[in-house]
């Protein structure tokens, strides 16, 4: 075969491969290219025009266009459709001492039976209620409860750089409930409002914070899972049971 013939054929085949590459899983362009090459070798009278015409026809074949939906928006919609929830029944909660878990946390409070307790890297205790809901108890370096509350507010409900629609739902001397919403993203992803609480225990100069949180290993859970109803019920149990040992 003449070198020019081979060059043109390879160009045509390369063009075909690139056209079908996006749809390779459905079309199988390798078989098509092999067939065209065989036809070309067996039909030496085939003109360049016919080869190029075949390429043009194949390139113009309709194929389903890829969806233009933003993957992040689709993922957020799916998450919103499958919002997890939990029942909060104080009768199922029993008093537990956290000091055996971490010597830095010398308090007791009511928690669900058989709940998972684990010392975290900060010397506090992570209380895993379920896959999406966690309570963290920490010994915080503040002078008093008021200072601790202001510090936690600056990271959550008053953190305008990361959240919108921040609102304190309930404020008491030893704790508060609040709602906030993560900022919408430029790619169109929108987040649902979520409600949380913070409660504090103080004794002999030590201040402990008790915060409900979103687990880091399940951070994609929709904010709608953290409802005001859940925050109210858990806060009430913690408020009535948390005490320094």
Image: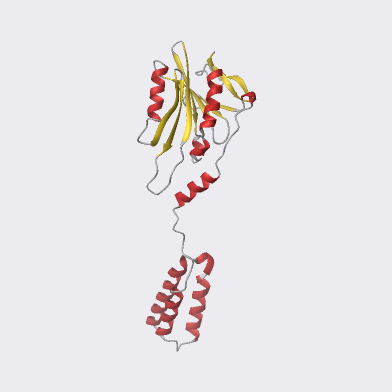
User: Where, quadrant-wise, is the N terminus in this rendering?
Assistant: bottom left
Please tell me which residue is depicted at 46% across the width and 59% down the height of the picture.
67
- Residue 132: give x, y in percent of width and height: 54, 36
Instruction: Relative to 212, say whether 50 is above or below.
Output: below
Q: Nearer the viewer, residue 108 or 172?
A: 172
Q: Residue furthest left?
A: 161
Give the residue at the far top of this rendering.
204
User: Residue, x 38% and y 24% (percent of image)?
Assistant: 151
Q: Position of residue 174 (x, y in %)?
A: 46, 18
Residue in front for this viewpoint, 68 or 44: 68
Residue 109, picture quadrant: top right
Question: Where does residue 226 sit, x and y in percent of width and height?
Answer: 51, 34
- What colouring style does the render use? secondary structure
- Would you say residue 85 is visible in this rendering? yes
Q: Nearer the viewer, residue 81 or 120?
A: 81
Which quadrant of the figure has residue 147?
top left
Left or right of 110: which side holds 180?
left
Picture quadrant where residue 241 is located? top right
> In the rendered view, would you say 123 is above or below 23?
above
**How many marks do you count on the picture?**
0
Q: Quadrant of the C terminus?
A: top right
Residue 44 against residue 95 in the figure, above or below? below
Residue 1 seen in this snapshot: no
Q: Nearer the viewer, residue 53 or 182?
A: 182
Q: Residue at image x 52%, y 78%? A: 35
Residue furthest bottom in the image: 45
């Amino acid at each position: 075969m003449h070198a020019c013939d081979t060059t043109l054929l390879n160009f045509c085949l390369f063009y075909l491969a690139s056209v079908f590459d996006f749809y390779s899983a459905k079309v199988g362009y390798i078989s098509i290219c092999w067939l065209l090459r065989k036809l070309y070798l067996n039909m030496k009278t085939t003109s360049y025009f016919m080869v190029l015409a075949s390429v043009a026809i194949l390139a113009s074949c309709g194929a389903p266009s890829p969806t233009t939906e933003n993957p992040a928006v689709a993922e957020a919609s799916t998450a919103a459709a499958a919002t997890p929830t939990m029942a909060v029944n104080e009768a199922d909660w029993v008093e537990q001492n956290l000091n055996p878990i971490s010597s830095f946390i010398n308090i007791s409070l009511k928690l669900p039976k058989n709940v998972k307790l684990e010392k975290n890297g900060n010397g506090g205790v992570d209380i895993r209620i379920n896959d999406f809901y966690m309570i963290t108890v920490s010994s915080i370096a503040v002078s008093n409860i008021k200072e601790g509350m202001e510090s936690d507010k600056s990271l959550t409900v008053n953190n305008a750089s990361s959240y919108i629609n921040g609102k304190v739902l309930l404020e008491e001397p030893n704790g508060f409930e609040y709602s906030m919403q993560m900022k919408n993203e430029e790619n169109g992803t929108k987040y649902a409002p979520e409600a949380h609480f913070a409660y504090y225990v103080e004794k002999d100069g030590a201040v402990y914070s008790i915060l409900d949180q979103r687990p880091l290993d399940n951070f994609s859970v929709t904010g709608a899972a953290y409802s005001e109803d859940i925050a109210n019920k858990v806060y009430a149990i913690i408020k009535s049971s948390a005490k320094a040992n």
